[in-house]
Image (cartoon, rainbow, N blue to C red):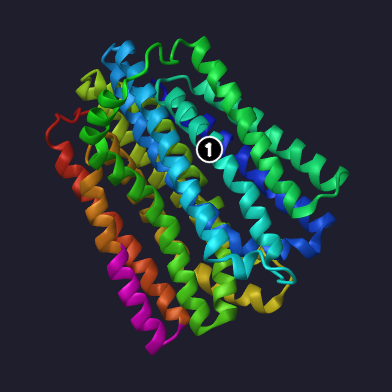
Amino acid sequence: MHLFGNALKNSLALLVMMVAQLGSVVLLGVWQPDELFYLGPVIPLTSLLSSFVSGFAIFCAVEVGCLMGKGNSQGARDCLALGLITVTLMTLMTLGLVMLAIVVSQGVVFLSPGNGFQLSGQYLLLWLPGLLPLSVSSVLSQSLRSSGYINHYLCLMVIAAAAVFFFDLLAVVWLKMGLIGTAGSFLLSSTLSLIISMLFCRKLRLWPQRWPLPGQWWKLTRAQSRRAAAVMANSVQPTLLKLVLVSLLTMVSPFWGSCAGIWTRVEVILLVPVNGLCGGMMSCLPKAYGAGRVELVNGMIVRGLCYVLLIEGGLTALGYWYADSLLPYVTDDQGVRIVLGEITERLIWSYPLLALGIMASQILQVLGRGSAVLRLTVSRNLMLVAAFLMVLSRVGPAEAISVQAAVNAGFAVVIVLALRRVQTRYLIPANL
């Protein structure tokens, strides 16, 4: 099992999707710049819903990968069937509640005639139906990856990215539908991804051959509900934490809040290596853990942590040294550059440790310790928000950013120690 090679393929898949999503914003900004502003109000909700879907997909993929590692391919298909039914029902319930809330509670804000945010509401109402095919295809694609079919996963991501860009080009440039066109593009590309992922699963004999009855589904779902809820909560927390911190900054200083929002986009690039390595780990570790290959599991854990620390450390050093040269590519505003430079100086040093903590959290969830990770992350988030708010209100935004860096670094140390405690149950090979 080639951890580093799989990590590179997963990183390539992430980069391809990032370029496609960035292309959507660029096309909208070039051809319909007046409508780009109305995308902002809906990004927090779409990000949270996407994180929620991703969390369940990761949980289901880990279970499928472990069963495949045990050689129980029928059990893996049954588990996938259970996951597909569950994610479909959860998504339909979520869509119903969110759309009802938009139409009833926020209708005055979003949908009333003459309101500037009417376009945002229309975009959201068209975007939400695309969440269903996205959720099902996410479960299927993540299960492909955890079962070891990383090449098929990469192929699926490339096709999905190409579809996103093509449909955006068609809707925004040719049909001139603007923001509404990008929502329709999301619906079409998600549906295409679902169809292709289903075809891949059928080809690789991963598609379920039997489906549980309602009574069986309820019994099996209740047995796994706590573990699944922990993994989903762990996936949603980072996005929610960023929203809270940026909102607090905006309340005190709208300019700093805007700059922090820009920094979150830069952060996505900085964390590509760790997300790629986590994806590579997801393609190898569940099968090895399910097969009971103790030495292989420990070897992958040690190598994964070392890879993350070295690669993220190198990328962070380059970002720190060449920040002044790179910031002009982010923005032309001199004031924004100054604030981004200060954020970089105060925050970027913690990213190698933050990446280490992310990797350790992912490994612990694969090892079935999602609840422990949830307790640690909730404690970290509450501590961070309290300290951030206190320093922000009494001292200033720059010092609050320093507090964020310190808490992130401390959490990384704690989560790695927690992983080490779990790992002591195994015999770590002496040559690693």
Closer to us: 200 or 210: 210
State the residue at coordinates (60%, 65%). 107
- Above or below residue 184? Residue 353 is below
Q: Position of residue 298 (x, y in %)?
A: 24, 30
Question: Label 1 is placed on what type of residue?
Answer: Leu
State the residue at coordinates (49%, 55%). 316
387 magenta-colored: yes
Q: Residue furthest bottom?
A: 394
Q: Position of residue 396 (x, y in %)?
A: 44, 85
Tag 1 residue: 132
The quadrant the C terminus occupies is: top left
Q: Position of residue 375 (x, y in %)?
A: 22, 54
Answer with the quarter of the image where residue 307 lies.
top left
| Residue 108 visible in the picture | yes
| Residue 57 visible in the picture | no
- Count of all numbered marks drawn on residues in the image: 1
The quadrant the N terminus occupies is: top left
* Residue count near mark 1 (Cα–Cα under 10 Å), binned few <14, some 14–19, many ≥20: many
Q: Please give the range of residues in magenta.
A: 381-396
170 magenta-colored: no
Answer with the quarter of the image where residue 331 lies.
bottom right
- In the rendered view, does 377 fall on the left or right side of 132? left
- In the rendered view, does 416 fall on the left or right side of 341? left
Secondary element at image label 1: helix
Q: Residue furthest right?
A: 174
State the residue at coordinates (13%, 37%). 424
Q: Position of residue 189 (x, y in %)?
A: 66, 35
Q: Main secondary structure of the magenta part?
A: helix
Closer to us: 80 or 162: 80
